[in-house]
Amino acid sequence: MEIEIPKHLVRALWREIRLRYPAEAVALLFGTNVEEYAVIREVLPIANAIKGVHGFGIPRNAYASACNKRPGQLIGFFHSHLEDATPSSADIKTMQSDASMIWLIGRSGNPPNGRDFQLRAFCLGAVPSKDDPDEIAVKEVHS
Ligand SMILES: [Zn+2]
């Protein structure tokens, strides 16, 4: 599986990471996910429902209103980590509650710097209960 993201949206996520540092940045990802090929067409940064520095949560009202405005177009979630772009055990638990979603994780570095910035994507695929998500290739494209 592969996920395509235009470079201007990558830059938007990077801006959001720096804006929210040291807390985790959070965004909803909209686009299409058809036959093993997902395309991100819009990112919607939202406030992190977790008030501390570690972890992230999506405010229920933001999630509901986004889904209502763009039915069927929510394909995944973005959030950032300072040190590594792999899903934490808490992330995996949340992934299991909706295995159709793609998880895009951005490593920012601490403090955020372009050298450490990395985007990786994961999904649980056909076995929603498993605890080792599959990695999805991230393809950055010119927009
Ligand atoms: Zn995480």
Image: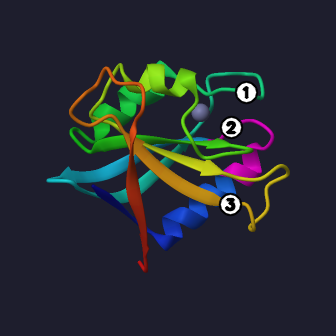
**First in sequence: mark 3 vs mark 2:** 2
In-front residue for pair 92/62: 92
Q: Amino acid at mark 3?
A: Phe
Image side of residue 95 versus residue 118, left or right: left
Q: Residue 36 at x, y = what percent?
A: 20, 54
Image side of residue 125 versus residue 64, left or right: left
Determine which quarter of the picture holds residue 65: top left
Q: Residue 24 bears which disc, if any?
A: 2
Q: Amino acid at mark 1?
A: His
Task: Determine the CA span between mark 2 and mark 1.
Answer: 7 Å
Question: Which residue appears at 30% of the width and 29% of the height?
Answer: 99
In-front residue for pair 136/6: 136
Image side of residue 11 versus residue 38, left or right: right
Q: Which residues are magenta?
A: 17-25
In-front residue for pair 55/143: 55
Task: Look at the image and say whether residue 15 sits in the magenta stretch.
Answer: no
Residue tagged by mark 3? 117
User: Residue most toward the left?
Assistant: 35
Residue tagged by mark 1? 54
Image position of 128 with respect to 1: above or below? above
